[in-house]
Image: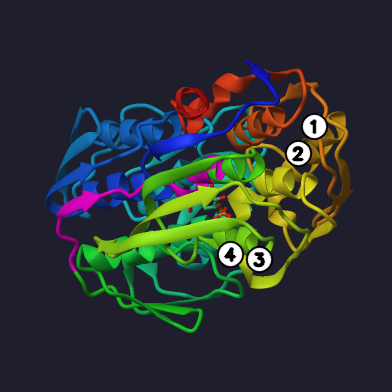
């Protein structure tokens, strides 16, 4: 993909595709609920398709029509043994959350992934699921492929999450559907709570008391209509683009503004961004709003502590904004970035440096001295969708043509990313 820099401005109203995390959860939880679930606004990206395929393989009737999906829920005991290996592709969410469901089944399953997923840590789910009594094994007890087998019973656990990970939390929460006794999960740092919200919405009570999450396996999941709001992680690229390009003024309609995801808005506002969140509403337990963004001058800031978990996927695009802000931005406590679809600390630092940005890689983040321009360059996406999109936005501020290698990986979370970008620029 070639991106020409020094663009005019971004003007217009857009919608971004449905939230990826909520899309995965609606397929998984809708499949094991009693009765039908109609999902509107779903994201049909490569990652979500993996989750859909997995449940189809386990006998669930799932029909797709545009951005709507109909699921005939089979109940928590109704999944069937898949007749082949389940391929999770690039999707950590599919592999980790699905494992939580599979350990409660009366059949065995094998989960594999692509090259990138094969190197992502799975001990973080293997350890707590085994503590619940599950049979789950991985390569070297750490990596995919994963194998799950039927066990007599699972039991609730008391578990302090050693890593701030919504995927680990969710794998445990989904396994509690098949367990006896109470489970308490202690989160040291806030992570996205879409699983808790969707379980509650469909009738399975999960309570969060100041970071301690309690579940008693008592409720019944009942299928309902689910509307998926726009993904704030996808909106983030256009939010930063509008801030960075003079004269821009855009509105992004119906974006999910769950407080466990809006760290990007808080940080950009603190940096001086002109962002207005309006038309707030609540749809199936998730807050939604329109977000208006205008060109703004940014100042450097410190990003650390609890906010990090609420903007973890946005750090590559925040690094782009910081590279063009006045002053220094320090990002700390983000070591989790090393375990994403690529090592995102290395990937974004290296590529932004090619554009002349002043970025210093740290073990748990980055130190970025902002400057007023970037240079065009030959850039590598590392086949990581979030790196490809962040670099595409950076390239808009470079005078000349930048090339993004492997830009097709945007299909993982945002198949129409470039169409929307070029529409806003025309
Ligand atoms: C996700 C949680 C986050 C995030 C990922 C999606 C989810 O990962 O980075 O893109 O849907 O639960 P971790 O929970 O592993 O940090």
Local SS, label 2: helix
Residue 150 visible to an observer of this rendering: no
Residue situated in front as seen by the camera: 307 or 323: 323
Residue 351, numbered circle: 1
Q: Is residue 261 left or right of residue 28?
A: right
Query: Measuring 28% from the left and 73% from the top, which residue is drawn there?
Result: 217
For disc 3, the neighbor class at 10 Å (few under 14, some 14 to 19, many from 20) is: some
Q: Which mark is residue 270?
A: 3
Q: Helix or strand or loop: what does disc 3 sit on?
A: helix
Considering the image in quadrants, where does the N terminus appear? top right
Pair 3/2: label in front: 3
What stretch of residues is rendered in magenta? 220-238
Residue ID for mark 4: 266
Res 53 seen here: yes
Residue 304 circle label: none
Q: Nearer the viewer, residue 85 or 406?
A: 406
Query: Which type of secondary structure does the marked residue at label 4 adopt?
Result: helix
Q: Which residue in the protein does label 2 denote?
A: 348
Compared with residue 120, is residue 66 higher up or lower down, i.e. above or below?
Answer: above
Which SS class for mark 1?
helix
Question: Residues at badges 3 and 2 in contact (C-beta under 8 Å)?
Answer: no
Is disc 1 surrounded by few (<14), some (14 to 19) or many (20+) residues within 10 Å?
many
Residue 336 place in picture, x, y as percent:
69, 54
Q: Residue at x 35, y 37 (%)?
A: 43
């Amino acid at each position: 993909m070639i991106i020409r820099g020094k663009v005019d401005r971004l003007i217009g109203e857009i919608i971004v595709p449905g939230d990826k995390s909520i899309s995965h959860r609606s397929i998984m939880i809708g499949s094991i609920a009693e009765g039908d679930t109609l999902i509107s606004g779903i994201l049909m990206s490569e990652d979500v398709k993996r989750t859909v395929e997995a449940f189809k393989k386990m006998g669930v009737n799932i029909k797709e029509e545009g951005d709507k999906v109909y699921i005939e829920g089979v109940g928590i005991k109704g999944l069937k043994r898949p007749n082949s290996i389940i391929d999770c592709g690039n999707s950590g969410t599919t592999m980790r959350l699905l494992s939580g469901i599979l350990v409660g089944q009366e059949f065995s399953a094998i989960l594999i992934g692509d090259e990138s997923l094969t190197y992502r840590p799975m001990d973080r789910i293997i350890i707590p699921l085994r503590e619940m009594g599950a049979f789950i094994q991985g390569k070297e007890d750490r990596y995919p492929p994963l194998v799950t087998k039927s066990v007599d019973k699972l039991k609730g656990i008391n578990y302090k999450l050693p890593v701030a990970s919504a995927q680990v939390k969710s794998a445990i929460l989904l396994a509690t559907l098949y367990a006896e006794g109470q489970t308490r999960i202690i989160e040291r740092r806030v992570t996205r709570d879409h699983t808790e919200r969707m379980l509650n919405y469909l009738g399975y009570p999960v309570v969060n008391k100041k970071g301690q999450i309690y579940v008693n396996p008592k409720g019944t999941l009942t299928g309902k209509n689910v509307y998926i709001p726009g993904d704030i992680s996808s909106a983030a690229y256009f939010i930063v683009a509008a801030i960075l390009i003079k004269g821009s003024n855009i509105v992004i309609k119906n974006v999910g503004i769950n407080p466990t995801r809006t760290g990007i808005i808080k940080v950009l506002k603190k940096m001086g961004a002109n962002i207005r969140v309006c038309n707030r509403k609540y749809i199936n337990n998730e807050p939604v709003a329109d977000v208006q963004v205008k060109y703004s001058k940014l100042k450097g800031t410190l990003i650390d502590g609890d906010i990090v978990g609420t903007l973890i996927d946005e750090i590559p695009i925040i690094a782009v904004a910081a590279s063009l802000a006045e002053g220094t931005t320090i990002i700390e406590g983000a070591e989790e970035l090393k375990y994403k679809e690529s090592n995102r600390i290395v990937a974004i630092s290296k590529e932004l440096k090619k554009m002349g940005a002043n970025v210093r890689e740290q073990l748990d983040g980055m130190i970025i001295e902002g400057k007023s321009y970037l240079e065009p360059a030959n850039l590598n996406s590392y086949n990581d969708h979030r790196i490809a999109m962040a670099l595409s936005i950076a390239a808009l501020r470079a005078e000349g043509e930048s090339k993004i290698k492997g830009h097709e990986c945007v299909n993982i979370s945002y198949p129409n990313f470039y169409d929307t970008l070029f529409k806003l620029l025309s």
